[in-house]
Amino acid sequence: MTGRQPRLGWVADLTLGARLVFAGGRNGLLRTLLIAVGVGLGVAMLLTSASIPTMLAMRQERTAARDDLFFEAAPPPGDRTLLVATTDTAYRGHSIRGRLVQPEGAHPPVPPGLTRLPGPGEMVVSPALARLLDSPDGALLRPRLAHPVVGTISAEGLAGPSEYAYYLGTDQLRPELGARRIDHFGSEPVGRGLDPVLTLLVTISFVALLLPVAVFVAAAVRFGGEARDRRLAALRLVGADAATTRRVAAGEALVGAALGLLVGAVLFLVGRRLVEYVSLEGISVFAGDVRPSPVLTVLIALAVPAVAVMVAQVALRRIVVEPLGVIRRAGGRRRRLWWRLALPVVGAALLAPLDGRAANATGTASQVQVITGTVFLLTGVAALLPWLVEAVVRRLRGGGVPWQLAIRRLQLDTESAARMVGGIAVAVAGGIALQMFFANVQHNYVLATGHDVDRAQAVVTLEGQNLAGTDLDALTARFRDIAGVERVVTTLVTGVTAADATPDDDGLRPLTRLRIGDCAALREFAVLDRCADGDVFQTVPSEESGSEESGSEESGPDSPDTAGEDVARPGQRMEIVGAGPAPGVAWTVPDRLRVVPYRPDPSGAQSTAVLATPGALDLGRLRALDAEMFLALDPTRPDTIELVRNAAAEFGPLGQVMALHAAVEADRFTQIRRGLFLGVVATLLLLGASMLVSVLEQLRERRRVLAVLVAFGTRRATLGWSVLWQTAVPVLLGQVLAVALGTALGAILLAIVDEPAHLDWPSVAGMSGLAAAVVVLVTAASLPTLWRLLRPDGLRTE
Amino acid sequence: MTHPTTDDTDRPLLAATGLRKNYGATPALDGATLHVRAGEIVAVMGSSGSGKSTLLHCLAGIVQPDAGEVRYRGRTLSTMSDAERSALRRTDFGFVFQFGQLVPELTCLENVALPLRLSGVRRREAEQRAARWLARLEVSDVAGKRPGEVSGGQGQRVAVARALVTTPRVVFADEPTGALDSLNGEQVMRLLTEAARSTGAAVVLVTHEPRVAAYADREVVVRDGRTREILLAER
């Protein structure tokens, strides 16, 4: 090893290391394969993460390109204009984007993804919607979209491959009935800025999800470490100096990392092809969008080999070579605590100055500080875990044979165990911090809708021009007959204006809402102590009605106007306005008009209105009145809402059905929450898979000892329990660390956004439960291999 | 501590007849037959790949033969369940392998105590008995050390102690001195045979070294999967 050209020496040593990777026959190849698969899984995950910016940008670009809702004034009708109406709907919790389109000339704009506009009654659908409509699962949707499909929307017109969307041609749209006139599709994609809290959340989410992957990659390059140590020790015995051995180790690590990069790239490319078949939380991605950012790809390609070499060098420090070539771990030297403890302390120290300065924490410098601080804090979990496992298991004694085998194994080699669960512990710590953060800031992003879901769970709005008449009973009966509909409140809604009202500058007269329904229905909108057919009510805010308790006040012809100019007066001549061009119908307010306080309807709306029972006006003369119905649904029949939507569709495509919810989350908050969910699922899947590889690798390393134990007559259960304890003890200790540091990180992050910190025990339990589930699943998945290795004929290797 | 009675010595404790075993297309045993009486030491000799280790594994119930049968104290091993065979290995058999194959994470004392603990003996008692056996095999000084911290000869003596601690009726020793120098090998064989004779245990000793086989009462040669008894005159 001496007397060589230094540069050539380096190359020779690295090459020797590379050759050693493939030495060792079948076992050597298996070890190399494990490393490649392990590192490859991590690399695939990193490449997927590096593709997220492109995925988001492409998705945003396509949704912006099909945009048809503009703030500028509508263009005048012409050869190149198109009328569009939104007919979005939902099916079993999935949104369906719907548009009615009606060209006004020969050259209307065509939305992206379509080659031509569908003719009246024709429909162009997304591939996912086409599949759904063709499948048994879509049976309940087919009546709603029972139109001939003349084409499919291509990828350019869709947010994702699993998006449900359709364009339906029509000739019934009119601008005065809610249709929009446009002369182009698409708007500039506008990246909406996130508020500081959400920015922090996104930043931390990325760190918390990717750090375990990095920890795992570092662990994967040590697969088969014992055999490698033996090889390196043998080299030292034949005269290789420490530096040469390190270079040989570096060569081995580099080849492992390179193979891992290769496998990762293959896994990524294969996964990319399959990604279109996956839809999580309503989000799906086109394979073409999954393109890693070039800069991040280069970083990954450099970082993975660097980490591999670094880990190999650190591991070498624990090898001792004796004259007989026996490898002995430097078990006598205990792990140092100070630098491990320093990591979270430094992390906390970096984050602490940002206390209460969330708005400032989104600048580039501060973001670096947040990321670095979080990385340090979470890395502390991985760094402290081996020390903690060592310190705890050193003190453990007694117990049955499985416990003794497990504890003694851990005492001998804490590194493998800690390495195996380190990624999980870091993921749990990050998850706890994020969940804690979510739980404590959630109140800022969850908005109460004001919906009274005890009274109704759905509201149906039907466009007037599609209703054949004004038969309230028939309308009510149509919806009440639906299985699962328990109660229907039906009212007809239109506008009413004083006959002598002065038009404004635009020629429009002030309108008051006129709601027509029976007494039971009207009680949903006003506090009525008595009501009979023929009665008319004017609703006003409760403080203006005089008596909220009594709920009404007689208002005769001579009574003073109690509620301002927009309130109808008995005997007043009015005009009832129909939808669209339908002529108004004259109506004189009956003398029995009473002023009553209004009551929020089940959707939370409350407004000044004239409420009329059918007997108070000549319903037969009225045309094109909109209908509004509140429905109480049987919660045990989730498909009832679909039947309601289908019934509403019978009255025209512009009918709307809205499910009522007590609260909704702010969109961006929901998106981040969904993103985090996807990330957690992906990370746990990766960690579960990697942990399985790691457990199998450890079992394989111990196959001879296991076979001997079986030869002694050791029961399978004894060894099974021993494996479980051996995994469970470090996992449990990892959980303790994860809870401690995750909670600390959560508290610090909450301090940054000036929110009080409360430990969210359900989140802690949930995250710990997830981690435990992963461990149990991995152990269960490894049992068949364990049973196979426990066959006594494993002794044949002797 | 001693097992054999007058009756026991008259009929074989362990009898294998017509054993056949193939590993894939490779025959390992081709009609091997062997009888072991209580308390006797039988050396099974043969070159590498002759099938002697496979014969030992079949005798111990570790490997099921494809044909033929192994009877232990009148019971056919192949008709016993896996659990019964495991129990037999815990209580009646002891094992010594070429590299000791001690459990690396346990101390030498715990390794020796392990078969007892697997049989349900309480920890303290198991370790007391293990300590006595370590003393008998002259390795008390390594009781608290892990296998990786002791020499090959010491490790092998610990393995012998582990094989004998349950006072088995049969000890199976597969190349017990294969990894040792001659001095250590001699010492291990002396201690193994002395201890076995003192407890009345039979020993099935697989070896390719005549020097080791010389410790046995009789020798059986395995060649191409078949056994042949070596008469005293041939020795």
Image (cartoon, coloured by chain):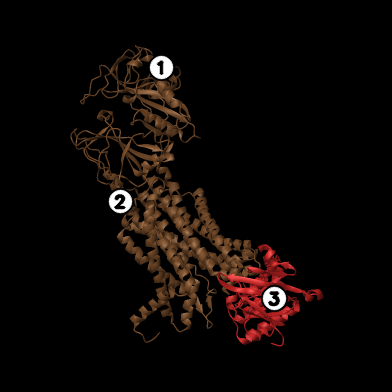
The residue at 72%/75% (across/down) is B35
Asked if both marks, 3 and 1, belong to the same chain, the answer given is: no
Rendered location of residue B75, percent (x, y): 73, 67
Q: On the image, numbered disc 2 is attached to which residue?
A: A57
Asked if both marks, 2 and 3, belong to the same chain, the answer given is: no
Q: Calculate the distance from the C-alpha at mark 3 to the C-alpha at mark 1.
A: 114 Å
Rendered location of residue B184, percent (x, y): 63, 85
Q: Calculate the distance from the C-alpha at mark 2 to the C-alpha at mark 3.
A: 78 Å
Q: Secondary structure at mark 2?
A: helix
Q: On the image, numbered disc 1 is attached to which residue?
A: A553
Colour of chain A in the image? brown
Q: Looking at the picture, tell me which residue is in the foreground, A413 or A12.
A: A12
Give amino acid for label 3: Leu
Near mark 3 (Cα within 10 A), the count class, few <14, some 14-19 or many ≥20, is many
Q: On the image, numbered disc 3 is attached to which residue?
A: B34
* Residue A776 placement, left or right of A98: right
Near mark 2 (Cα within 10 A), the count class, few <14, some 14-19 or many ≥20, is some
